[in-house]
Amino acid sequence: MHTNIAKEKLKAGETIYGVFSNGVSAEMVEIMALAGFDFITIDSEHAPSSDETNRLLIMAAESRNTPIFIRTPNKLDSSILRSLDIGAQGLLLPQVNSVEEAEEIIRAAKYAPQGFRGVGLGRGADYGMGIDLPNYFKQANDNLLIAVQCENIAGVPSLDAIAQVPGVDVIFIGPFDLSQSMGIPGQINAPQVQKIMDTVLEITAKYGKYAGIFTFSVEQAKQFSKLGFRYIIAGSDLRFLSDGCIGAVKELKG
Ligand code: 3PY
Ligand code: MG
């Protein structure tokens, strides 16, 4: 089992910067890892990648010593279990709007005593080869980095309780869906959206958890870091590719 270096960095006080893999490409995963991102998150909520492909993307990231997480397509126990069994070191769960949902996620993701994760001993457990079984369960629980998304106004009253759930490490703002749920889609700098960002920063600080957020802009990522966000996803492979293409064509053709 690989040590979750991204989680270690968080614990050591660093801000970690990640990137979404939406291109379903092992090569792009390797490039992002070699560039030095702290972690990569396969976006199986939005990208057309399923477990069969995800396991290859995970192997690509591991070959470049970079932690790789999965944003699951939903909050089902089976999606959580399959992502972990193929070797994801962390999860990002969309639309977590109640304490019950957060508790169920932890039950599905952690072995006893914290939860009831099904025991498969697949690739995430080195196929059961050479592992010290009694220690494995604890190590797997400790290694995992769980981020739940705050991206719906309906979940905001539950944030305080969600942050207190043991095993929830990060509350991660999805600014686009959050603003959409407030009737102002895409207006991520609107004061009412910013107010919820402040709330997430306050609540995570209060309970010793980490605040996370997504942005397409490197400039904004730096500002979020200054505000206290510690787990920042700054763009995606497809976005970097499209920016690079647009820039090159502009240079060539004016
Ligand atoms: C959102 O902005 O809704 C997100 O989920 C970003 O990852
Ligand atoms: Mg979202």
Image (tube, rainbow, N blue to C red):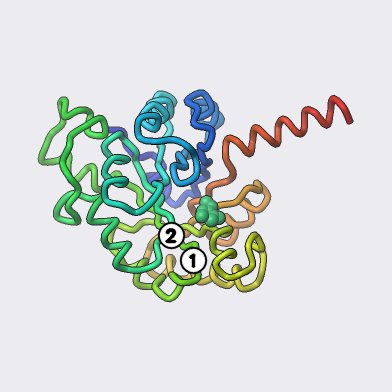
Q: What percent of the width, then of the height, locates residue 109?
A: 26, 50
Q: What percent of the width, then of the height, locates residue 172?
A: 47, 57
Near-viewer residue (67 or 240) = 240
> Looking at numbered disc 1 in the image, what kind of residue is underneath it?
Asn
Q: Residue at x 39, y 26 (%)?
A: 56
Q: Which residue is mark 2?
A: 95
Near-viewer residue (142 or 89) = 89
Q: Is residue 213 visible?
A: no
Q: Residue at x 44, y 42 (%)?
A: 44
Q: Residue at x 47, y 49 (%)?
A: 14
252, above or below 216, in the image: above
121, above or below 212, in the image: above
Left-right relation of 144 to 197: left
**Marks 1 and 2 close (CB-CB < 8 Å):** yes
Q: Residue at x 49, y 66 (%)?
A: 152
> Looking at numbered disc 2 in the image, what kind of residue is underneath it?
Gln
Q: CA distance from mark 1 to mark 2?
A: 7 Å
Q: Which residue is mark 1?
A: 152
Judged from this view, the residue extending furthest toward the right is 254
Left-right relation of 111 to 245: left
Q: Is residue 59 visible?
A: yes
Label 2 residue SS:
loop
Tell me: is circle 2 under 8 Å from ligand 2. yes
99, above or below 18, in the image: below
Near-viewer residue (235 or 229) = 235
